[in-house]
Image (cartoon, rainbow, N blue to C red):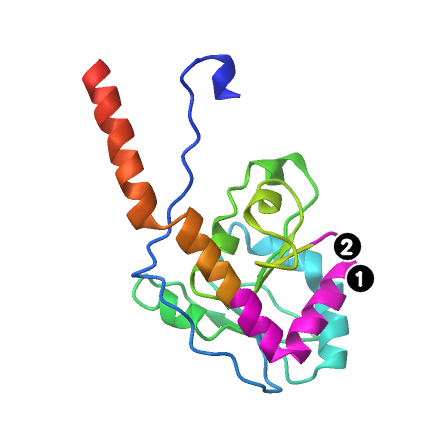
Amino acid sequence: QAAEYCPDARTFEVAENLERYTQRPPQTAQDDVTIGWLGSPSTEKYLHLLAPVFCEIAKKYPGVKLKVVGGGSFSSEDIAVEHVTWNMDTEVAQLHTFDIGIMPLPEEEWSLGKSGGKARTYMAVGLPVVATGIGYNCQLIEDGQTGFLVKDHADWVNTLSRLIEDHTLRQSIGAAARADVAERFALTRLGPQFVAILREVAGCA
């Protein structure tokens, strides 16, 4: 859209600092799998989209829990929910307690403008991500290779079930996700590009 108004418009991807977002420890086989969501109070409402999914997952896997970092209000009668206040100093440690990262979004125009930041952060620490297949998520995630793109209730339940049951799959998808972030979004790669753009603009002023 910017190119309609400026012939020299460019897209600059959001970078991830992989020195900060370190690799999550290896996945292990366990019954108490943690589905994690990282965000803010303003976007926590999207978790309600998955209320029926959490109900079905909790019935199939009683040991599974949902950890919400940065929200504070979401509750469920079906799945155990743990709330943790977001903090810069503990953010990465909390991400390391997730086994699966989720990014539900509504099917609306607003979602088309989302940058995939939540999913990319999960990927950066080596987590398998399950995200609504809309907007930029479809460019960010290679479905079945670096994460999973889902559209409806059945997709969510089936994909989460696969990951809950198969810690090897969680490990392999998470590793592929982190490698993809390192290749496409690493700060060490994109940082110099951003500096070059700023210098070019400053030189044209």
| The stretch drawn in magenta includes residue 45 | no
- Residue 154, disc: 1
Task: Using the image, determine if residue 123 lies above or below residue 76.
Answer: above
Task: Using the image, determine if residue 134 lies above or below residue 179.
Answer: above
Q: Point out residue 104 in the picture as x, y percentages from the top left corner.
A: 63, 54
- Residue 152, disc: 2
Q: Is residue 20 visible?
A: yes
Name the residue type under label 2: Asp
Give the mark count: 2
Q: Point out residue 147 in the picture as x, y percentages from the top left corner.
A: 59, 59
Q: Are marks 1 and 2 in contact (CB under 8 Å)?
A: yes
Question: Would you identify the image quadrant in which residue 169 lies?
Answer: bottom right
Left or right, 193 with reference to 178: left
Task: Using the image, determine if residue 84 lies above or below residue 187.
Answer: below
Q: Secondary structure at mark 2?
A: loop
Left or right, 6 with reference to 137: left
- Identify the magenta region: 150-174
